[in-house]
Image (cartoon, rainbow, N blue to C red):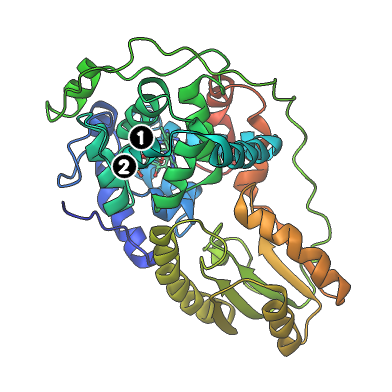
Amino acid sequence: MTVPSFPSTRAAALDRLERFVPLAGQLYATGRNADPGPDAAGAVSRLSACLRYRLVTEREVVAAVLTRHSLGAAEKFVQEVLWRTYWKGWLEMRPSVWARLLDERERQRQHFPNSRALASAESGMTGIEGFDDWARELVETGYLHNHARMWFASIWIFTLRLPWALGADFFLRHLIDADAASNTLSWRWVAGLQTVGKTYLATADNIARYTGGRFAPKGLAREAVALTEPPVGPAQPLPELAGYSAGEPSLLLVTPEDMNPESQFPTGTPIMAAVVAGGGNLLWGDAARDYVAAAADDTAARVAAHFGCSADVLVTLDAPALLSAAREAGVRQIVTACAPVGPIADRLATLAPVLAGEGVSLVQARRRWDAQFWPQAKKGFFAFKERIPELLRADGLPA
Ligand SMILES: Cc1cc2nc3c(=O)[nH]c(=O)nc-3n(C[C@H](O)[C@H](O)[C@H](O)COP(=O)(O)OP(=O)(O)OC[C@H]3O[C@@H](n4cnc5c(N)ncnc54)[C@H](O)[C@@H]3O)c2cc1C
């Protein structure tokens, strides 16, 4: 099996984007559902790891595509990129859903009785054609095509009857683009929890059709009865990110949530020094950690050149390392891009009071893109989608 490679420098990510742009119109719209397998190129961009860690931003990707295509011609691709933004905003306004995943995962780890079934699903030994191949492909390459992710999650939940939270956890431990929002909410969507009562049923015909006949699994569940849970409360307003003082000399903290601070903090921002957190204690899987380690080296070099300061990579993000970097830089403010709901935000939430106790504030700043789009994710994607052209135009894009 050929391991798909994912650009882990910004220059390589921009190069991939540039090569993909001509294909983002009709070719993408008609070809995106086909999964030709790991050895074939296919119609999708494979930009997800770059977008997930923001080596390139959603805005940059959409802007590049809209310089070549009209919004009408590239609508499908732009909408897919905006699905990512939508999921981020949706979870940001309902952080309890992330907490639910963590609780449910813990509960299932303790109590799910059939550890053998779980092990055979994760190692691709169930005997179900396709499913076993995707399990191995995921572990070996750190990536699955979107359709394969949907089929896999559906078979996991409805044919194998395994706990959805352990499937989501399996993905988060192996996907390079592992993302708290896109992953958790997509698994919930397949299970019938996200759009309450509406499930996704994988069928042999659909799999055979979109894998070019590579797989036609037998014995799949014929119905997908939605899982249930107590209702999720209404969307909360986005948390206020108070306290960032743009004029105050700061230590810049770059986390894997946003590895492109050059496009967020304007030139002239008094960044006295920077630290770039590698994936060490922040990400769940080795593949994601390895990818971020490479991206962190690239990011540190870019940040040092852009802000004209030192930029060190921190293998582990902890309070002593941050305090020592802040003291060395002679600052009392550490600024970082807003970390959306997920393990990194959880980590920052535990660090902030410790740093504050030492007289150093850890403050987050939200990108304009996020501030603009996230609050629109109060309802379903359809309502969100309707506002895309107007919001893109408000951000200066030719939509
Ligand atoms: C069960 C399940 C779990 C998933 N887990 C993740 C995850 O952990 N991280 C992640 O980034 N994506 C996740 N996705 C969404 C999607 O599968 C991947 O983003 C996509 O396969 C990435 O490949 P690509 O870059 O070639 O996508 P393209 O088709 O080229 O799309 C361009 C970009 O749009 C975004 N995008 C595309 N489809 C989706 C989608 N359905 N939802 C959200 N964003 C999308 C991605 O950022 C992607 O890079 C999941 C989907 C499912 C069904």
Residue 393 visible at all: no
> How packed is label 2: few (under 14 Cα within 10 Å), some, or many (20 or more)?
many
Residue at the image point whose x is 58% and y is 43% from the top:
395
Q: Position of residue 230 (x, y in %)?
A: 69, 21
- Residue 358 against residue 41 in the figure, above or below: below
Callout 1: SS: helix
Amino acid carrying label 2: it is Leu
Mark nearer the N terminus (2 vs 1)? 2
Q: Nearer the viewer, residue 235 or 123?
A: 123
> How packed is label 1: few (under 14 Cα within 10 Å), some, or many (20 or more)?
many
Residue labelled with disc 1:
149
Residue at the image point whose x is 55% and y is 82% from the top:
312
Residue 206 visible at all: yes
> What number is the disc on residue 59?
none
Q: Nearer the viewer, residue 160 or 347?
A: 160
Q: Nearer the viewer, residue 241 or 104?
A: 104
Picture mark count = 2
Residue at the image point whose x is 23% and y is 23% from the top:
207
For residue 288, which quarter of the picture? bottom left
Residue labelled with disc 2:
144
- Residue 39 against residue 361 in the figure, above or below: above
